[in-house]
Amino acid sequence: MTKRRGRRWTAGAVAVVLLAILGVVTAQVPAPPDAEGLPRRLAPMVQAELAFAEAARAKGMKDAFIEFAAPDGILFRRGPVNARELWRRTDPAPTGLLSWHPTYADVARSGELGYTTGPWEFRPQASDEKASGHGHFVTLWRRQPDGSWLFAVDIGIDHAAPAAPDRALKYPESAKKGGGGSERSADAARVAVLAAENELAADATANGGGAALLARAAEDIRLYRPGAFPAVGLEAARPALDKEPERRFYVAEGVGAAQSGELGYAYGTYVAGAERGSYVRIWKRMKGNWRREDTEWSVVLDITNPTPRPRRAQN
């Protein structure tokens, strides 16, 4: 997956497909949470995430990613790429065990768009007691016309091994609430999300990436940066964003929104000094009447994934 499932290959000499959702069952990996007791609209998406992780354990990463990617699903390799096409070209298929599970999930009131996030681990051999790679994934899911759930976007970061496993699955109060929706509402929301993205990009170019994001961050924002554990909440994210004073140049290459019009996302590429990479940003109408098109949008999740620099040839 790109976990870095949009994941990336890492660790030692072994490819670690990072950034998708981690959490499979082996003798060494604790059982993931289940979807029982979750809000009605949220449960099918979480079940899809768990099935995705189980497929990676049972069938291998390649088959799992092809099975659970939407036809237009996106992973990131020096920019957005079609997930199915990328994995079909991956030959030979990578070996090893990529496992993950969701620890946070949210779904739109219309119930057809949402996202999951949580920790992943990689083991070069499924029987290995200890993982050689760790990180977090972010996956955006969309319900398909046949009722199944497939991922629209998958991305992730790597970081050190956590001191203790995080098993609890959390979700916001809004996930319990329903609401109507229509393609017209989704179209209007996509326009609004793109406008918010363009405004943030202009601010980041003029005043720095950290300041631009802080000005639009929700109180419960989740901030993901490589090499660091996710920062959850505005106060936790602020120190990390204060370290990003440089100008950032964002180019949105895709946007999406729910039919209820209150949840949307954007993905694309960015440049910050010598650093280039990909990003995914999730937006939500947080304040006031979420049904009104003029209600303020806030960033609830922001993740960046720098592109590794090519190695110089050795003389």
Image (spheres, rainbow, N blue to C red):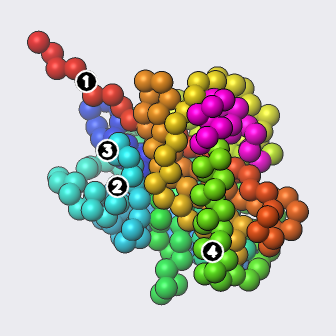
Image location of residue 14, percent across then percent down: 28, 37
Q: Which residues are magenta?
A: 201-218
In this rendering, is residue 315 above or below 25? above
Per the image, the residue denoted by label 3 is 125
Per the image, the residue denoted by label 2 is 81
Spatial CA distance of label 1 from label 2 is: 22 Å
Tell me the element at label 2: strand
In the rendering, which numbered label is found on residue 311? 1
Location of residue 85 (image quadrant): bottom left
Closest to the observer: 134 or 247? 247
Left or right side of 45 for 74: left
Mark toward the start of the polypeptide (3 vs 4): 3
Q: Residue at x 60, y 74 (%)?
A: 187
Magenta residue check for 205? yes
In the rendering, which numbered label is found on residue 240? none
Mark toward the start of the polypeptide (3 vs 1): 3
Magenta residue check for 138? no
Image location of residue 140, percent across then percent down: 54, 61
Mark toward the start of the polypeptide (1 vs 2): 2
User: Disc 1 marks which amino acid?
Assistant: Arg
User: Disc 3 marks which amino acid?
Assistant: Gln
Mark toward the start of the polypeptide (3 vs 2): 2
Closest to the observer: 210 or 29? 210
Spatial CA distance of label 3 from label 2 is: 28 Å
Per the image, the residue denoted by label 4 is 186
Image location of residue 305, percent across then percent down: 47, 39
Spatial CA distance of label 4 from label 2 is: 24 Å
Mark toward the start of the polypeptide (4 vs 1): 4
From the image, state whether disc 3 or disc 4 is nearer to you.
4
Q: Residue at x 55, y 33 (%)?
A: 248
From the image, state whether disc 4 or disc 1 is nearer to you.
4
